[in-house]
Image: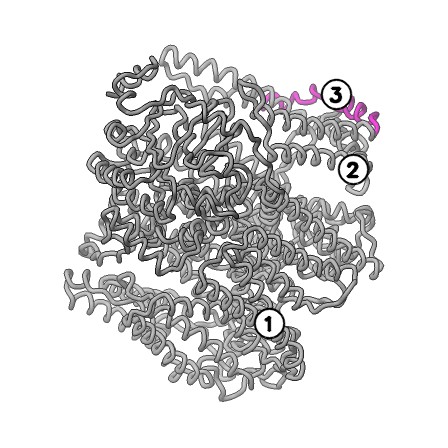
Amino acid sequence: MSVSDATTAVTAELAARDDMIVCEGVNKWFGDFQALDGISAVIKEREVVVVLGPSGSGKSTWIRCINRLEVHQEGRIVVDGVELTNDLRNIEKIRSEVGMVFQQFNLFPHLTVLDNITLAPIWVRKKPKRETEELARSLLERVGIPEQAEKYPGQLSGGQQQRVAIARALAMEPRIMLFDEPTSALDPEMIKEVLDVMKELATSGMTMMVVTHEMGFAREVADRVIFMEDGQIVETGTPEHFFTSPEEERTRLFLSQIL
Amino acid sequence: MSNTDQATLAATQARRPPFYRDATVLKWLAQVVALLLVLFTLFFLATQAQGNLEEKKIATGFDFLGTALGSDLGSGIDTDPHTSGRALLSGAVNTIRLAIGGIIAATILGVLVGVGRLSSNWVVKRMCSVFVETMRNIPLLVQIILIFVVIASLPRVEAVGEPIHGWLHLSNKGVSIPRVHISDGFYQWLVFLLIGALVGRWVMRRRLRLHDDTGRETYPVLSFAAVLGAFAAVGWFAHPIFGWVGAIFGLVADIIDSLSQTVVQAVISALAVAAAVWWIRRFLARRRTPAGLTKLTDDDRFRIIFAAAGSAVVIVVAVTVPSLSSVLLDLAGGRGIDWLRFDNGFFGWLSEKFGNGRTGAPIDVKRPDIEQLGNFPNYGPSGLNLTQGLAAVYFGVVLYTAGFIAEIVRGGILAVPKGQTEAAQAVGLRRVTMLRRVILPQAFRVILPPLGNQYLNLTKNTSLAIAIGYTDIVQVGQTVYNQTGKTLEVVAIWMLFYLACSLTISVVVNFFNVRMKIVER
Amino acid sequence: MGLPMDPVAANVDAVEPWAGEAEPAQKPEEPSLSARQWVRQNLFSTPFNSVLTVVFGLFSLLVARGLLNFTFSEEREWDAVRTNLRLLFTHAYPEEQYIRIWVCVGTIVVLAGLSVGLLAGRGRGVSMKKLSLNLIGVGSAVALGVVLREPSVLKDADGEVLRDDDGVLRESFAAAMADRWAWWLAAAVLVGAGAALWHLLGDERRRKTFVPSVEMFVALVGLLVASAWVYPWGHYAFADGEFIAEPGRTVAMTTKLPWTVMWVLLIAAIATGRQLRRAGAGGGVRVALNLAWLLSPFVLYWVVLRDPALDWGRVATVDIPLAVLFAVGGAAVLWLLTDPRIGELGRIIATGLVGVAAFNWVAAFFGWYSMLQKVRLSFLLLALAALLAHNFAGERAQRLRLLGGWAAVTAVFHYMATIMNTPSTVETPTEALIGGFAVTVIVAVFTLLFSFPLGVLLALARTSKLPIFRVLATSFIEVIRGVPLITILIFCAVILKLFLPDGMSISLIAAATLGYTFFSAAYLAENVRGGLQSIRRGQFEASDAVGLTGVQRTVFIVLPQALRVSIPPLVGQMIATFKETSLLAIIGIFDLLRMANSVIPAQTQFLGVKREGLLFVCLVYWIFAYSMSKHSQRLEKKLGVGER
């Protein structure tokens, strides 16, 4: 699963060793509507990047292009040295390298929490069942709900479900985690428990890309903030720079509206 | 964005993966292989059939439609058909009659029973439940045969058991009631009705506007009915003045007759090309963005290729089978098709029906009578006769389908949220008004799609007539292939006929469905 | 076509069956009303309601009277049914081999009992209130029937009906009522028992006490079985003898012992099932039981009923080596292909295998080389397994389990293929092995077994993103749904022969089952499609995001959810298929309906006697269809589908 693995390093030479995600001139349209307009960015290993922007600015579309839930139409995306193309081998590789957490949790309602977590490691990573279950229990411990393993997702609260979703993504031992508005569907009192898990993850050195509206999280945890509008990257910078002295007019307008 | 980002990727180009790893190529490869497999299987089966038929010295083709058939039909528009084609047509008409009559009766009965199951009266509720559970849980075929057998145990024709002599006969030969039928001047009268409806609509609109402006009660529907009634009454006597309408249709028929089949082939081909071009253009238009045409993916290219190939197939068929075009011409124009005994084509038939010299009453009534040709008395042709077989199939499908429709109606009414009833009561609507204006329109939207399915089922179920020998299209078809050995062709005709019926019902139901949706929003 | 009529589940969000795993609470019945209150409220609440009650009450009495007089008229010859019970249920299956039929019934009874025992404990059964009301209701109905039925006819010493000029002579009303004392007694016992229950328990207790439905069902069956020891149900018929009924031998006499054994088996199986459940037997037992259910139709029909005469020499030299070859060779191939490191090479090998499998048929078409059909099918099976193998690859234990599964499938397939190609030793005078109700059940069961996978595949193809698959599936489904079943059956029975290559033949029943399978699959596909479309997009995205392949996504995530939602319509389709088996009579198979409609009326003793048989057929179909539909309604409630 490392870059040096000879059978999977397809386009490793394209990017520097510590570039985890490289996007270059990425364009995407939905019919007449251009969702992404020339996105170019690099995310380094162990970096935590928060993507901000008004709704409809293309944040989610971009993050979903990175593990090919959406297919970009122009430009190039290289993830962990593997370029996203029609190549089945690359898609397989990237899907198992990149974990994703959704706004609506998207847990599998007919499987127990434990089965939700172990399904992919067993069938995609081809790991022994016993080992995977131990891993799953330790992950549940890590996200703070070890006692819920045998329950069904429908029996858990929203915050607990989202933490299970994070554990499910982590069980694949990904090198990158993508968060698509992980707290937007939660009641206010549950947001904190999810954010705490994410903070812990960030401090452990995971490469993370987070779409969120939680300014506090961005300020506290992010290494870099990217602001998007109308499918374009308007401004990027460190949180201090971004929240205290933004350069662009549009950024200032956005910040004045939400803060 | 640092400059180093640009430098790392710009130096190289994305490599195309080998085809066996390319998601798009594999996707289409799998599909094309599946298509080829299906085509090969069909081709294989066809060759086998051809070989087997040749071995048995059975020729294929539809020529048998024009040859004589050696048997009579029990009932229908033509009980003594000269050709197989005519016999099949007669059977098809029987099926359509059964279906239309059955749909009307089953709907009425089904709605009554369905509403009855929701009644607060215990007796009514129980009776309706028993009816539904009995009808739904006994196979239709068993019911039809049982009804057939029970009718056979009714008294004989000449004996007692004719409740109202000359008006209603009930016997082991079935039921006979007076026949209301289209007579001489019907079509000219139809023109009157059409004009009456148009004028009536205009009057109704005016009255409605008057009502909206002044708030006075203006009886718009009543005035529409009055105008239509007046036109109908005048037309009853004055209809011969529209004798000239036929000449117009005659002219159209002549024009169509003068066309050659090449023209039809050209029209079909042009339509196919136009359809493909329209589809591809629409497809490309959707892919167009303000910034110009998006790069076409391989998927898009494959789709365009298949659209083009489809139209090419249509053109090839049209060109290589010229008889198809000439049949179409004959059917539309004034020549008609011999074996159908459809002597004039469609417009020829219209020109005759609307033609001059038809002065009789538009509609006539005949009372049933009993005639004795041989040893056994039977109903004469003048009454509307529900023969034993027809009655069995008819009552069978009506009762059976009514059981299902009742459940659909009940479900539909229950599906209207309780809040709607409460809201209607809160604004002070009376019970009847509430049902008519609030509950039923909403229930109708839920009911309509499954109701359409039941209509389809009813139409298909009339084919069970074969079990008791009533001459619907399946039974006639069986007679035909037993005599001619043309099983394949007969089955093809069945399938086409029933698919056409299904399509018609779907289109009608869809029409109402769309209307209901527009009303809703 | 049919676009507006899709049974697509509209209420996507209403269904969350997994949330409702807990057992429904023992909800007591509503408090009882007094008889007067009940009558006022339900029959005479308004003047209009009173009129309705009177009019429809009289009407229903009239209908009931007509039905009773028709059913029990002196013109009815119920002997026709009583004498031909064996014909109606199994047609010409030889009597000395009847033990085979009992083995089949016993197997099904045991499996059903085990399943019921394992699942029992759900639901609350019947409340005492309902039970006593039902008893009173049935008793009153019996009494009403006794009054409504017209007095019996008078007969002379020879059993001839006495007539005068006006028609048949009947006894007086009083005499008739007196003659029916046994019926009065039955009515009195039923009403009395009901009323006693009602009054003894009191409102509170009768509403809150429940009788478990399993126990009640077992008790009812026990009563029926016991009745066979007391009352001589049915006669036996000579096939070609002078007497249609063998004097002294009754159906009850020869079946009372077997039925009693069945009843005991049922009780034992239910008890065993419950014991297993209490002992905490989990997935393993259930899987084994489901497998037994799945295999039982094949084994019971081809092995038990047919009693094939195996040619052991050929079995030892051809069949067993072939099976071993495929089991071992296939296992080796699959071992290779389930290696997680194999990558595209595996897909290329699998595709090559598919090519070989397809080429075998092409070669057969052109006659290049000959091959057993069994071998061609085995190659196809292997190719399919190879295509899917990489989806189920895993660590060593998982791979070994997969190989075990392959060996088991190969063994079963080769065993069944060998058995099916072996002639039967059971000799019957007809072409078919068995007829009557048995053939109805057999065709229905096999139709269900074959049409389910086909229907699911069609539904998947129809909802697929790949346009050619979609077009192929849609055209198949819509063409089949657009034409009547009878035309498909005639096609299969009459024309299918023409399409078969030389030397291949298909029996009428097999052809009919094929027709039913196509028809049923098209409808099933629409039901499953409804379930598939109710799955939210997020489920697909989540499966993709964790890296599941398309096949894994379908098998692990999509189908379990979709099938659960579509269970009620699937059961409905099952009932429809069961009823449609009556069409077998039209294409000349001796099923239940054909027995009643053509065979019995052709016997010299019962010439033209049809109505009795047809009424009996109605009753049989009604009992089965009604109980299935009631069961599905309960299931629907349990799953919470369709609730608003």
Q: Secondary structure at mark 3?
A: helix
Query: C347 or A104: which is nearer to us?
Result: C347
Identify the subunit bearing mark 3: B
Number of other residues with Cα within 10 Å of mark 3, as a class: few under 14, some 14 to 19, many 20 or more: some
Mark 3, mark 1: which one is toward the viewer? 1
Mark 1, mark 2: which one is toward the viewer? 1
Q: Point out the image quarter for the C terminus of chain B.
A: top left
Q: Which residue is mark 3?
A: B248
Q: Which residue is mark 2?
A: B324
Identify the subunit bearing mark 2: B
Q: Which residue is mark 1?
A: C414
Contact between marks 3 and 1 (CB within 8 A): the answer is no
Residue A105 visible within the image: yes
Amino acid bearing label 2: Leu
**In this view, C608 is above or below A225:** below
Q: Secondary structure at mark 2?
A: helix
Q: Quadrant of residue C498?
A: bottom right
Mark 2 and mark 3 lie on one chain; the one further toward the N terminus is 3
Instruction: Give the CA separation, mark 2 to mark 3.
Output: 27 Å
**In this view, C15 is above or below B392:** above
- Which contiguous range is marked in magenta? B232-260
A214 sits to left or right of B256: left
